[in-house]
Structures are given as C-alpha cells and as structure tokens.
Image: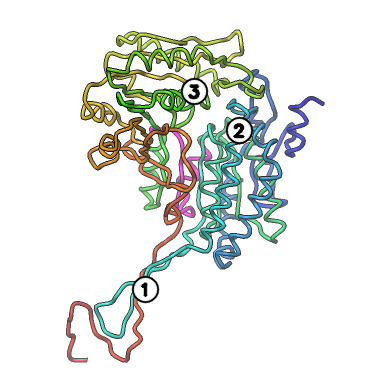
Amino acid sequence: MNHEQSLLKRLNIQPANPGVCTGPDGWLDSGAPLLVSFNPTTGEPLAGVIPATPQTVDQAVAAARANFETWRQLPAPRRGLVVRDLGLAVRESLEPLGELITLEMGKIRAEGIGEVQEMIDICDFAVGLSRQLYGLTMPSERPGHRMAEQWHPLGPIGVITAFNFPVAVWSWNAAIAAVCGDTVVWKPSELTPLTAIALQHIANRVMADHGLSGVFTLAVGGPEVGRQLVADERLPLISFTGSTATGRAVAQAVAARLGRTILELGGNNAIVVAADADLDLATRAIVFGAVGTAGQRCTSTRRIIVQRPVAEELIARLTRAYGQIRPGDPLVAGTLLGPLVTGAAVTQMEAAVAQAVAEGGEVLAGGRARPDIGPQFVEPTLIRMPAQTPIVRRETFAPILYLLEYDTLDEAIHLHNDVPQGLSSAIFTDSVRTAEAFLAAGGSDCGIANVNIGTSGAEIGGAFGGEKETGGGRESGSDAWKAYMRRQTNTINWSKELPLAQGIVFEGL
C-alpha cells in the first residue's frame, strides 16, 4: 500500500463514498453517478463520491432543521464542549488531514497542515465564545422599567465553501454557528469532496460521543446542490464563499425569500511599498502573499504599488526571489509552489498573461505553463504594468503579480482603491503618518488593512471579510458571531404602573 492509499484509508475514505450525511449512521447513497476527485499534481484519480440528489439534499436539510429544535435548547457552554471535542478530534488527525488537502487541491504540505491547525484554533476560539454571547442593558425612558437585548440561535445554516480552503472556511462558519445554537448543512466544493467526507467522519464521531445527530450535516455535489440550499426557506442564513458572479446570484436568490447571506467573494489585493519601507520585510511578505497556495487565495497579493525611488531595487529583489521558486510536488519538503487546481485555471492564467502583455505589460519573471512537471503547473509570474489596465483590475486565481509605480501617497491610495474588489490590503512604511493615512477613512477601502505585514494569512481573532464586490460579509473572530444569531430587544416593567413611551397619555380606559 502506497502513502496515498494509506492516507485515504486512515481517514476512512473508500474508493466510492456516499456524499450525503445526516449524522452518525446517517450516510445516504443517492445512487447518482460517481463524482471523482483528482490529484492536481498528477492528474490521477484519488477516489469518488456519490453526490446528492434533490431528495437527499432535502433529507440533510430536514435533519438539520429537526435537530436544531433540541440543539438550540442546550446551554451555550455545553454546545461549546461539543465544539471543543471536535477540535480535539481534528487535532488527532492534523497531519493526515493536511496531506489530504495537499493531495486534493495542491497547496504545499505546510499550508495544508496550517489550514487544519486553523480549524483547531477556531474551535478553541469558539469554546471561549460559548460563554461570551453577550447582550446589552440600556436605560429606559420609563420609570420602573429596564431594557436589554439578547441573542438567540437563528436556525439551520447553509454553508457553501470553495476549493482553496476546504477545511478552514467550513470551520469558521460551523464552529461559530454551532456554539451560537445553529445546526449546519455543508455543501463543499465539488473539487475537494474527499476532505469534506473525512471531516464529516470526524464530526460524526464527536456527535455520537455526545448522543447528538444532525448538528453537522453534509451534501456533496455540483452547483445544483448549492442552488437548492440557497432556495430553501428552512435555511435562514446562507454563507457563501466563491466567485463574485456566483455570489451575486446567491445574494439575489436569498434576498428574494428575505433570508440572510454572508458573502466572501473575490479579492484583488494590493501592497503599497513606500520609499522608506524595509525592503527585506516587504519582499518576504510579497512573495508569500503572491505565491502561497499558487495564488489561489482570495487574500493573495495581486498588485504591488511601489514608490518610484525604490521601484527598481524592489523589482530586482522580487525577480531574484522568483527565480529561486521551483514548482513541484507539494508533498515534498522544500517545495514552495504546487499546481493550480484545474487545467482550466492554467488556461485562464495563460490568457491573463497574454492580455497583460497586450495592454503594455512587461513579463519580468515566469509567465509560462510547465507541463514538463505536471498537467497543472505554472511558473510564478511578475509583470510590470504601465497603468492599472482592465486585466489588473480583474482577479485571476493564479500566481500573477502586477507591478505599478507611484509618486505621492494620494496617488498610491487612488490606485489601490480603484478596483471593484475590497478584501485585503497592506502598506510597508516606517512612517507613522503614512501608515495612519493608509488606515484612516480616506485610506484603504478594504475590510482588512495591514501595516508592515502582507495581505495573506488573516488571524482568526479578527472578523474576516471585505467590501464592494468582495460581498461585505464577516466570518471568524471579533463579533462575527452575531450574523449567526437573531437579536431580541426586551423591555421589562418591574413597577405597578404602565407609562407609555415619549410621555404619551392614553386616557379613557
């Protein structure tokens, strides 16, 4: 048995796996044709999943709905214990789960393991949160009264995730939603179904240990499964991570039934490098942000806006760094760049490079596919652009980095903000004034703005999300938990009088 087969067996992945689960002992075989998961490094099949049908999707939602009635009644700290045990169970499978991510979508092993660690960390965060679902008290204008607000579970939550973070994004939603008292129906990317199957096995074991079912349910399939969840009125909230185009359709469909959405859509993230920046620090951050996950993060660095006095030096540093990056097997130690997730992604990258050149760009490094390494490998690419042309304003999910130059900070901020997306941003400077201007109301228009650290690698303690075409949603830390709950305002009269608000007198009764 080779390493791949041993890994799949350890995670309970079979050659053919039911793709719908309602809880422990609740795996449903729909009988639909097999959905095969491929290794992007080799192009070879890994295993298959029997996808959901409309009937089995309905069963998954029904299970989540039915079990919500009892799950919401458990005290939040007890719900936190379940999430704690989920994190502990995942910790036991840290390395195999991380390697499965690498096998299924191609990020390097260190990133795969780091993503699983992120799930463990968010579970820890959620356990603490389970004792901190705070409301407020407010003074009443009426004597003998007090006002308060409290937060209640919202309902079953539909979570639709993307291929690039097949564990972390689900956990951001599922761990927080669970301690809030919600159940979760998960539709993972059809490109990473095996990772979802492995996680569901772990979640089932934890649910069984606590005598639970239906807290975490699963429905694997293509866009039709997502559309069914989006249309289902039993799901008051849909959390969607993916493209802006699909996000628009999700927002419209959910709004039509007066549901709620959390949208985590595209990014076109820039780093501003001022003349006084620490270029050693900036170079490391830029390379990781642009090359990590083969440029397939929504927080990937896609634009560098560098002040002219240091432009040539920074370009020379980046060119040298890019020359040292060799695409290769992401499971091999020392590899920094794995494959793109599909052949279509390679085609899209090649088209973007060609368009950039047509718009006046100069390729400084990379720019080519590498079929000699494998079917979906590309070179990390640096392109110097004369202006922020149409291709620069568009997100391409690939390791392409565009270089632009500026003279004044106002010019840099204008270039930075003049794109449809608004997720992550950063500036490298040793000037407090420059840094604060970038973080001020007239600075970066992104949901994330950093100083002397790159655009990629957000911490779980802060709310994650962006503005404009990024969708406006927030997940993970801070008070993002409020999206998964319903707010209730309470007025309590502890007097024997019934005064009306605004001093209104209603006589005659």
**Which residue range is magenta in the image?**
224-244
Indicate which label's residue lies in the foreground, 3 or 1: 3
Q: Secondary structure at mark 1?
A: strand
Q: Are marks 3 and 1 in contact (CB under 8 Å)?
A: no
Q: Is residue 242 left or right of residue 167?
A: left
Q: Position of residue 263 (x, y in %)?
A: 41, 42
The alpha-carbon separation of the residues under discs 1 and 2 comes to 46 Å
Q: Residue at point 32% right, 16% down?
A: 311
Q: Is residue 306 above or below residue 180?
A: above
Q: Residues within 10 Å of mark 2 (few under 14, many from 20)?
A: many
Q: Are marks 1 and 2 in contact (CB under 8 Å)?
A: no
Which residue is identified by label 1? 490
Quarter of the image with the C terminus is bottom left
Which residue is identified by label 3? 291
Q: Position of residue 380 (x, y in %)?
A: 48, 16
The alpha-carbon separation of the residues under discs 3 and 1 comes to 51 Å
Q: Is residue 227 magenta?
A: yes
Q: Is 62 in front, or is 370?
A: 370
Indicate which label's residue lies in the foreground, 1 or 2: 2
> Looking at numbered disc 3 in the image, what kind of residue is underneath it?
Val
Say which label, 3 or 1, has the lower sequence index. 3
Q: Residue at point 54% right, 58% down?
A: 128
Q: Is residue 155 left or right of residue 443?
A: right
> Looking at numbered disc 2 in the image, what kind of residue is underneath it?
Gly
Which residue is identified by label 2? 112
Q: Is residue 133 above or below residue 401?
A: below
Q: Residue at point 24% right, 42% down?
A: 441
Q: Residue at point 41% right, 41% down?
A: 250
> Looking at numbered disc 1 in the image, what kind of residue is underneath it?
Asn
